[in-house]
Image (cartoon, grey):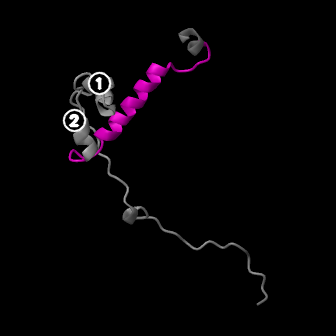
Amino acid sequence: MEAMEVITNVMPIRFRAQELCVREFMRIRRKPDDSKLQIALRTAKIVRGKITPLSYLKYVSWEFQRSLSNLKIERDTGCQVANIMDGVAVGLIDLCESTGSA
């Protein structure tokens, strides 16, 4: 199976799953410290062999977390509907030429 993945240039499923977990981990870590997802990720545990999605995410991303060590993660600023068009000027667009007759 792995040989076939190499020949067809397809990433092995275990690496793809790990990549997706790390991406999701970083998406959650960029949220404010008091966000519900951040709190849930910090408190996620494996209890009596039961793995939750967040505890799996935390487990798979453990090595990645270690590699971050003291790096500062830039917080997600969030896009608000009220300020999405701030600083954007919309002008008039001519859709047709004047024909000269009224």
On screen, residue 89 above or below 36: below
Residue shown at the point (34%, 32%) measured from the top left: 53
Secondary structure, magenta segment, majority class: helix
Q: What residue do we see at 66% from left, 73% from top?
A: 94
Residue 59 - label: 1
Mark 2 burial class by Cα count in 10 Å: few <14, some 14-19, many 20+: some
Within the magenta stretch, is there residue 66?
no
Q: Is residue 5 above or below residue 80?
A: above
Distance from label 1 to label 2 (Cα)?
A: 11 Å
Q: Which residues are magenta?
A: 7-35
What secondary structure is found at the residue carrying circle 2? helix
Q: Kindly indicate the quadrant of the structure image that contains residue 22.
A: top left
* Count of marks, rendered view: 2
x and y percentages locating residue 8 in the rendered image: 62, 17
Residue 29, given in percent of the width and then of the height, sits at 29, 39
Q: Which of 62 and 40 lies nearest the eye of the viewer?
A: 40
Instruction: Kindly tell me whether residue 75 is visible in this rendering.
Output: yes
Q: Quadrant of residue 10?
A: top right
Which of the 4 image quadrants contains residue 41?
A: top left
- Image quarter in which the C terminus is found: bottom right
Quadrant in which the N terminus appears: top right
Query: Who is closer to the viewer here, 43 or 91?
Result: 43
Q: Which residue is mark 2?
A: 42
Amino acid type of the residue that numbered disc 1 sits on in the rendered structure:
Tyr
Using the rendered image of the protein, determine whether residue 72 is visible from the camera's viewpoint. no
Q: Image check: 10 left or right of 72? A: right
